[in-house]
Every structure is written in structure tokens, then in C-alpha cells.
């Protein structure tokens, strides 16, 4: 298979400083603390040990690596580390989204879909990654992305029209539904009818289960357990997606420009060979998985921040109304909305939807003066880099205007990562986020419910733990109305009014 699974020498100890494992529970407690609150726990570790820390002194932890016998887990932050890890493509490998479960792909016929499930670009490295990325690039060129504008506007219009005003809605859920529909439409196209949406929903359910810690912690194929359900869903998904691919192959002359059709038609420049069906499935899972919850959370966090910063919300609405006059934006108009650009930039700095870049060393290497054995997991913190006071004075203040006077390198500001694995869908994400915000804010004002508690959750994608319940009002410019004293650990990430 594509990930180079090699034996790790058993004498490979990790000597990066970190907390001492518990006498009775070993390193499990450290892993649990990280899974429960990766931002808060690592903030404490960085403050105690410095910019490079291990999850447990002496190593022995494994959060994500698909290799057995992982020497341990290391966390780093700051531009220098971001640069070293993201640009050394042949040393810092990426593993499939299935992480530790990927090891089990050869166990039985039922676990076999793990060979391709959510592998895609995440599961290939070195030269093969560069080649497959090149093959996918045409689907993400600006012209192609701009052609999705009409679909995004139409879907946004439908979702906004369904949003009854003067009521409370979970905005996190609304944004998930919206981006799910956009992802499904652009991935699968129109010609397969409502089957596309059904497959999209099943894919979302399966990816959610894959990412749930309980699936990995109790990985038994016994009815009633999450791992059993995951295997059932993967089998179902395989059948459904292979059927879609057959349908697409039949309809191939109808000029559709969805991503799946493009993957089917893609040919390697040198060999002229197409992608195998399993490779197409893997790429589809990853593009969908990487592209839909990320954008949904970027939107949710931005709407939350705007609800807490009345002056920014008022200025942004002025800009939108002046340029758009109540209408959805054209691609050209999006270029003429500088405050919208800065609001999104600042939102993804302060609350990055993807807080970590995870890698596994393909060979022994050196980082920050420490020797990392082959197979070491390295997590680069986008979040902690974005909160460095040396780079961003008053880092916890949401201040879109800070971007009027500063430019930051890709290693200092990287919500979409950096290096050869920089997000392939960033242009698509920005288009979608801008269109949705421009349409929503001209039509509605969102206000947090009273005494709302906002806590973060998630390692791969950071989202509000209990959704984002907000009142939806027709846009009335009453921006100061929603400052009701939000609680929760969002307050240690962003300075909010009424502290
Ligand atoms: C706000 C929205 C988004 C954010 C914050 C985001 C962030 C990221 C980050 C940080 C990475 C690098 C992960 C790593 O190296 O560990 C990444 C990779 C990727 N993203 Fe995005 N992303 C977003 C939207 C999208 C969209 C809309 C798509 C597709 C339509 C997409 C597809 C991908 C793919 C395929 C990769 C893997 C690239 C590779 O390994 O070569 N992303 N994204």
C-alpha cells in the first residue's frame, strides 16, 4: 500500500521533555487530556516545557500514527517549527484520516475498505503525493472554482429562506447543512439526482464515526459497538459510491464539471494511466471530509465573533450594502470587499478551524535540538502560532483592522497550512465563506442566546462543543443587543465584551 509501513527499531526512545506518565494509568491519562481539550492542555505544556514538548516524558503515546510501535508524540508551535515540519516533505509524512485504525485493514474482509477509506491525498507521501496532487489540481484552479459561484448562491438562498426569523437556531448545524449541500453538489454534480445527497450524508456520518475517539478506544467488531457500525457504514458507502461512479461513467459525455467526473477522467501526465476506483474513492472521502466541516466551522466562528463585536459588524454591513445593495455577490464584487476579507482572515487567526497539522517522521531526524526517532508523531500548532504576542500584539483581541498594517509570512499565519501540503481547497473555501457571509449578513442579524456557554471541542477540526444557538432576526442593525455575557473556555481564546 502507499504508506511506507516499516518496522520501527525497538530501541528508539524519545527524549523530548514532557509530563511524567501516571504511576497507575501510564500515558493514557495524557492522551485523554489531549483529546478532551487539545488547546488548553498543550497551552499548559508549552508554558511548562517550552516550544517543543512531548505528550509524555519518555514517549510511548500514539494519537494518530498508523504505524505500530510509535515512539511518541511531540507538539511544537512558532514559525520556525512550522517551516521545518511543513516544508520537509520527505521527512514529515502524513497518514490516512483513519489513523490508528488503518493498521487493521488486513484483518478481515470487513476491515478491507480501510485500505482506501479516507486515504486520498492524506495517505500518500513523497513523490506519489506530488503526482496525485498534480492530477487533482485542475479541479481547484481559480476558473473552475469560480464556476461554482452560482451553485453556492442558490444553495445559500434556499438554506437562508428556510431559516424562520425571530426564532433560535443552532447556527453550527445550519452551517453544516449548508456546506454539506455545497460539498455534495460540487463533488457529485447534478446528473445523479438525489442519490448524491444521500451518499453525502452517509459519507458525513461515516467520517464523524471515524473521528470519534470511542471508535478507536473500543475497536471491536461486535454489534452495538461503534467500530462495528463503522465497518457496516463503510461497506454501505463503498457500494453506493461505486454505483455513482458507474452512473458517472455512463453519463460522461454530458459536460458535467463536478469533482468526481474530473477524478474519473484524470490521467497521469507520464504514464497516461487513470486513478483506480479505490483511489477515486479515497480522494473523494478526503476532499469531502477536509472541505465541509472546516468551512462550516469557519463560518460558525466568524458569525459568533461578529455577534460579539458590534462595531465590526456595523462596518461590515455598511461595506456589504454599499457594494452589493442587498444582492448576492458576483465573483468580481468579492474582490471589492476588503473588510470582509480581513474579518475572515482575523477570524481564522484567532479561532482556526483546523488547529493542528499532524505528521509522522519517515526517518530519524532532528527538531529543536532533539533527536526524533523514525515514526514519531509531530503535531504543529496552528492555533498557538496564531496566538503568539510577538507576531500578533494582544493576540486574544479580535481586530480585523490589524491586517491593514501588517503582512505575515505563510509560516506565521497558516490557517490552511503551508508547504507542499497547503490546503488544495483554500480558494474554494474562501469563495464559499465570503458568499455565505455576504448573503446572510445583509438579510439577518444573529444574536447569541442569553448566558450562552461556548466551549471548544475537536482535534482535527475545532468546533463549539454544544453547537451555537442564536436568535435570528431580520437585519435591524441592533448590533449591541446580543452582548449577554458568553461563558465557557472560548473566553481564554478571545477577549469578549462584558468580561
Ligand atoms: C476554512 C476551510 C478550510 C480550512 C481551514 C482548511 C485547512 C486545511 C489544512 C490546515 C490543511 C493541511 C492539513 C495538514 O497538512 O495536516 C488542509 C489540507 C487539505 N484540504 Fe483544506 N481546509 C479548508 C477547506 C477545504 C476545502 C473546501 C477543500 C476541498 C474542497 C479542502 C481540501 C483539502 C485537501 C484535499 C487537503 C489535503 C492536501 C494535501 O495533503 O496535499 N479544504 N486543509
Image: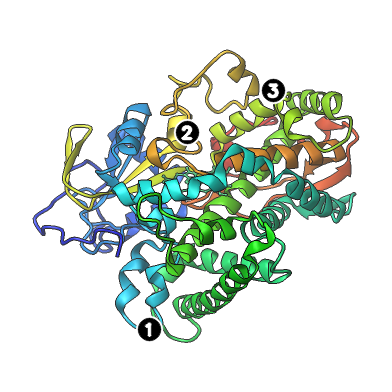
Label 1: few (<14), some (14–19) or many (≥20) C-alpha neighbours in 10 Å: few
Label 2: few (<14), some (14–19) or many (≥20) C-alpha neighbours in 10 Å: many
The dot on residue 109 is 1
Inter-mark Cα distance, 1 to 3: 53 Å
Residue at horizontal 69 percent and vertical 30 percent from the top: 497
Is residue 197 rendered to the left or right of residue 211? right
Q: Secondary structure at mark 2?
A: loop
Residue wearing tag 3: 338
Inter-mark Cα distance, 2 to 1: 40 Å
Q: Is residue 85 above or below residue 224?
A: above
Q: Nearer the viewer, residue 154 or 23?
A: 154
* Mark 2 residue CB less than 8 A from any atom of ligand 1: yes
Q: Nearer the viewer, residue 333 or 379?
A: 333
Residue wearing tag 2: 414
Mark 1 and mark 2 in contact (Cβ < 8 Å)? no
Q: Is residue 351 above or below residue 272?
A: above
Q: Is residue 212 visible?
A: no
Inter-mark Cα distance, 3 to 2: 19 Å
Q: Is residue 430 visible?
A: yes
Tell me residue 285's x, y (percent): 51, 61
Quadrant in which residue 485 is drawn: top right
Amino acid at each position: 500500500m502507499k504508506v511506507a509501513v516499516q518496522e520501527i527499531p525497538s530501541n528508539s526512545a524519545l527524549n523530548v521533555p514532557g509530563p511524567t506518565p501516571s504511576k497507575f494509568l501510564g500515558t493514557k491519562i495524557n492522551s485523554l487530556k489531549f483529546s478532551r481539550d487539545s488547546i488548553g492542555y498543550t497551552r499548559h505544556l508549552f508554558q511548562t516545557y517550552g516550544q517543543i514538548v512531548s505528550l509524555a516524558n519518555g514517549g510511548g503515546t500514539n494519537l494518530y500514527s498508523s504505524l505500530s510501535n510509535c515512539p511518541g508524540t511531540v507538539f511544537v508551535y512558532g514559525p520556525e517549527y512550522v517551516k521545518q515540519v511543513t516544508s520537509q516533505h520527505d521527512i514529515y509524512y502524513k497518514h490516512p484520516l483513519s489513523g490508528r485504525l488503518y493498521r487493521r485493514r488486513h484483518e478481515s474482509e470487513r476491515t478491507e475498505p480501510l485500505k482506501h477509506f479516507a486515504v486520498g491525498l492524506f495517505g500518500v507521501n513523497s513523490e506519489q503525493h506530488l503526482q496525485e496532487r498534480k492530477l487533482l489540481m485542475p479541479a481547484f484552479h481559480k476558473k473552475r472554482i469560480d464556476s461554482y459561484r452560482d451553485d453556492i448562491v442558490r444553495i445559500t438562498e434556499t438554506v437562508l429562506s428556510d431559516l424562520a426569523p425571530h426564532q433560535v437556531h443552532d447556527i453550527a448545524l445550519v452551517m453544516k447543512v449548508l456546506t454539506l449541500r455545497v460539498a455534495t453538489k460540487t463533488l457529485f454534480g447534478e446528473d445523479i439526482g438525489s442519490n448524491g445527497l444521500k451518499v453525502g450524508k452517509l459519507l458525513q456520518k461515516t467520517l464523524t464515526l471515524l473521528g470519534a475517539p470511542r471508535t478507536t478506544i473500543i475497536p471491536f467488531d461486535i454489534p452495538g459497538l461503534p467500530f462495528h457500525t463503522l465497518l457496516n457504514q463503510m461497506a454501505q458507502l463503498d457500494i453506493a459510491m461505486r454505483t455513482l461512479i458507474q452512473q458517472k461513467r455512463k453519463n460522461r459525455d454530458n459536460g458535467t464539471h463536478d469533482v468526481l467526473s474530473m477524478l474519473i477522467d484524470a490521467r497521469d501526465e507520464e504514464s497516461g494511466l487513470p486513478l483506480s476506483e479505490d483511489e477515486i474513492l479515497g480522494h473523494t472521502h478526503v476532499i469531502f471530509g477536509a472541505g465541509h466541516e472546516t468551512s462550516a466551522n469557519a463560518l460558525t466562528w466568524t458569525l459568533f465573533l461578529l455577534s460579539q463585536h458590534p462595531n465590526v459588524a456595523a462596518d461590515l454591513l455598511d461595506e456589504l450594502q454599499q457594494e452589493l445593495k442587498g444582492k448576492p455577490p458576483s465573483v468580481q464584487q468579492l474582490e471589492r470587499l476588503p473588510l470582509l476579507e480581513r474579518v475572515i482572515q482575523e477570524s481564522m487567526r484567532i479561532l482556526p478551524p483546523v488547529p493542528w497539522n499532524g505528521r509522522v517522521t519517515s526517518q530519524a531526524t532532528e527538531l529543536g535540538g532533539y533527536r526524533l526517532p523514525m515514526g514519531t508523531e509531530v503535531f504543529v500548532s496552528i492555533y498557538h502560532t496564531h496566538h503568539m504576542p510577538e507576531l500578533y500584539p494582544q493576540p486574544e483581541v479580535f481586530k480585523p483592522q490589524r491586517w491593514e498594517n501588517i503582512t505575515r509570512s505563510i509560516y506565521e499565519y497558516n490557517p490552511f497550512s503551508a508547504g507542499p501540503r497547503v490546503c488544495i481547497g483554500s480558494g474554494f473555501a474562501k469563495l464559499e465563506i465570503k458568499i455565505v457571509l455576504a448573503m446572510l449578513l445583509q438579510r439577518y442579524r444573529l444574536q447569541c442566546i442569553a448566558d450562552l456557554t461556548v466551549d471548544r471541542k475537536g482535534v482535527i477540526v475545532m468546533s463549539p462543543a454544544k453547537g451555537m444557538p442564536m436568535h435570528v432576526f431580520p437585519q435591524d442593525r441592533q448590533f449591541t443587543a446580543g452582548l449577554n455575557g458568553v461563558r465557557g473556555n472560548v473566553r481564554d481564546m478571545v477577549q469578549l465584551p462584558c468580561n
